[in-house]
Image (tube, rainbow, N blue to C red):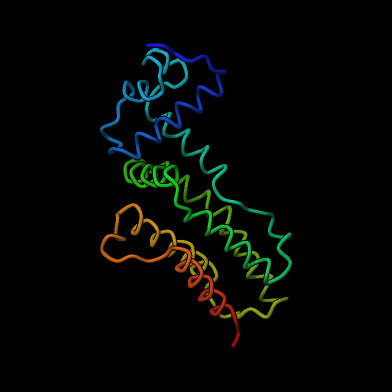
Amino acid sequence: MATVRMKKEDRIQHILDSTLTLIGRKPLASIRTAEIARESGISEGALFKYFSSKDEILSQIMKRYENTAHPTVPSEEIKTVEAFRDFINTYLQSMVRKTTRRFSYLRLLLQVSMGDEAMGSSKYNQVKNGVWTIMEDRIKYGQIHWGFKKDINIQVQVRLLHLSVLMFFIEQEIFNAKEIEYFDMSTIKDIAIDNFFHLLSPN
């Protein structure tokens, strides 16, 4: 097998990308390290120089993807209702973008989370301590400075917004519900945001 020379970091990323490509084509449980090596253009022995197991490869994909996947900003930089709405829109738009890489990642996330409690918990905590914390902070700020309604359950409403759009996207694109009933995800996102800000409005 001819191996293309790459720097170590480039080789590692290539292996991760090749694994995601395989995940997009077949069930995770059926993928073996030998197949990942073939897809990466290296021997299985060479693969083990970089990763000790398939689980380690999957863990690295999860970490790297989430570190670059969704935009966030410090909450104190969001100083107006318009900026808050733009932040939510940008985040949700990145969440529902239609790319082969995104679909493969979501397939991986769903399969890994069902079989690995630690990875599922890690993902949840990442979102909880990231975008949800930013949104909760800005709603509390908005209750003081922007006239947001005070008698709402902030934690629940933030999660409902995020998870409703995400699960709509997963149903449409990953579980292929669009073949039965198609919805445009940009429209779904916009309606969800409109509903969210209507809920926050005192009138």
Task: Name which residue lies at 58% across and 56% down.
Answer: 131
Residue 148 x, y percent position in the rendering: 63, 78
Q: Is residue 143 above or below residue 113?
A: below
Residue 144 x, y percent position in the rendering: 71, 76
Q: Is residue 34 above or below residue 106?
A: above
Residue 70 x, y percent position in the rendering: 56, 50
Q: In which quadrant will I find the C terminus? A: bottom right
Q: Is residue 127 above or below residue 164?
A: above
The one nearer the camera, 151 or 67, is: 67
Residue 195 x, y percent position in the rendering: 50, 76
| Res 118 quadrant in image | top left
The one nearer the camera, 102 or 126, is: 102
Q: Is residue 184 above or below residue 38?
A: below
Task: Name which residue lies at 45% across and 30% down.
Answer: 16
Q: How many marks?
A: 0
From the viewer's perspective, tell me whether residue 184 is left or right of residue 30.
Answer: right
From the viewer's perspective, tell me whether residue 26 is left or right of residue 137.
Answer: left
From the viewer's perspective, tell me whether residue 175 is left or right of residue 53.
Answer: left
Q: In which quadrant will I find the N terminus? A: top left
Task: Name which residue lies at 39% across and 60% down.
Answer: 167
The one nearer the camera, 73 or 113, is: 73
Task: Name which residue lies at 44% across and 63% down.
Answer: 185
